[in-house]
Amino acid sequence: MSEHISLTLKIWRQKDKNTPGKMVTYQLDKVNTHMSFLEMLDVLNEQLIQKNEEPIAFDHDCREGICGMCSLMINGQAHGPERETTTCQLHMRHFKNGETIYIEPWRAKAFPIIKDLTVDRTAFDRIITAGGYNSTNVGNAPDGNSLLVPKENADRAMDAATCLGCGACVASCKNASASLFVAAKITHMAELPQGEPEAKLRAQNMVAQMDAEGFGACTNTYECEAACPVGISVTTIAKMNREFFKANIKGD
C-alpha cells in the first residue's frame, strides 16, 4: 500500500451560528497514510493559511482518545468508519487514494454550530451540573477492603465512567437523543454505594435537564452504542430508566 494518497475533501464551512453554511471542496495531495485524521486537517489548514485563506475551525485537545473534543461526522459516521475509535485516533490508512471524504459537525438542535466544524456542547455541562454533588466524604484513598463493592457493580460503574462526553451518541441518533450520555453518568454513581445518598435527585434532575436542553427521545435503534468511541452499552439506558422510575415512585 502506498504511504501517500490524494483526497477530495468536502468540508462544512460556516462563519458563525447566524450565517448559513455550505460544503466547500478542497483537494489535498500527498497525504501520509500514517497521519491521524486531525493531522491531515492540520496540513490542510497550513496550506490555507499560506494562501491567506481562513483555516477550518475544529475541536481538538489531547489527541490521545481521552478528552472527547474531536467531534466530527466523517462520511456520515460519528468519528469515522472505525468502531470504538475517536477522530484523533483514526488514521488515513483507512481511506483510499482518490477518495472523497465528507466532513461535517455534529448535527443536533442542542449542539448549535459555533464555526465550521465546532459546535457548542455546553448542554452536556449543564446536565452534569444538574446532577449535583456527591455528599459522601471519601477523603484520601481508602484501604481496598474497607468499602465492599461487588465486582459486577464495580465493572459496570467503571465501564460507564469511561464516557468521554464527546456527543457522538447524540450526533448519530436520528432523534438527537442524549440518553446514552446521561445514562452513563447516572449509572456510574448508581452502581456504587457512594452514589446512594443523592441517587433520587440525580436521576430526576439530570433527566429533566436533558429534556430542557432540547435533546430528543431514545430511538432504541442502538446507533448510539455503535457510534460510541469507548463502546458504552445501551444497557446503561435501561439502568437510567430504572433509576428515574424508582426516584419518581418514591418521590413526594
Image (spheres, rainbow, N blue to C red):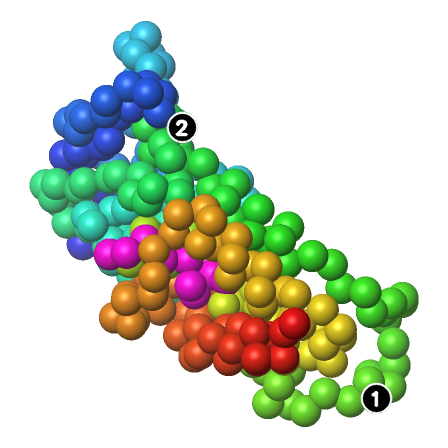
Q: Earlier in the sequence, mark 1 or mark 2?
A: 2
Q: Which x, y percent locates residue 96?
A: 15, 49
Residue 176: within the magenta?
Answer: yes
**Which tag is nearer the camera, tag 1 or tag 2?**
2
Q: How many marks?
A: 2
Q: Which x, y percent locates residue 120?
A: 45, 36
Q: Which x, y percent locates residue 189?
A: 65, 72
**Does residue 152 appear left or right of residue 71 in this picture?**
right
Q: Residue at x 52, y 77 (%)?
A: 245
**Does residue 135 appear left or right of residue 79 in this picture?**
right
Q: Residue at x 52, y 41 (%)?
A: 122
Q: Residue at x 81, y 65 (%)?
A: 135
Residue to which mark 1 is pinned: 145
- Amino acid under disc 2: Ile
Q: Nearer the viewer, residue 113 or 204?
A: 204
Residue 43: within the magenta?
Answer: no
Is 85 above or below relative to 99?
below
Is 171 above or below relative to 179?
above
The numbered mark at residue 114 is 2
Q: Which x, y percent locates residue 19?
A: 28, 19
Res 233 quadrant in image: bottom left
The kind of secondary structure element at disc 1 is loop
- Quadrant location, the N terminus: bottom left
Measured Cα–Cα span from mark 1 to mark 2: 48 Å
- Amino acid under disc 1: Asn
The kind of secondary structure element at disc 2 is strand
State yes or no: discs 1 and 2 in contact (Cβ < 8 Å).
Answer: no
Q: Residue at x 24, y 39 (%)?
A: 103
- Quadrant location, the C terminus: bottom right
Q: Nearer the viewer, residue 18 or 70?
A: 18
Is 105 above or below relative to 49?
below
Magenta segment: 174-182
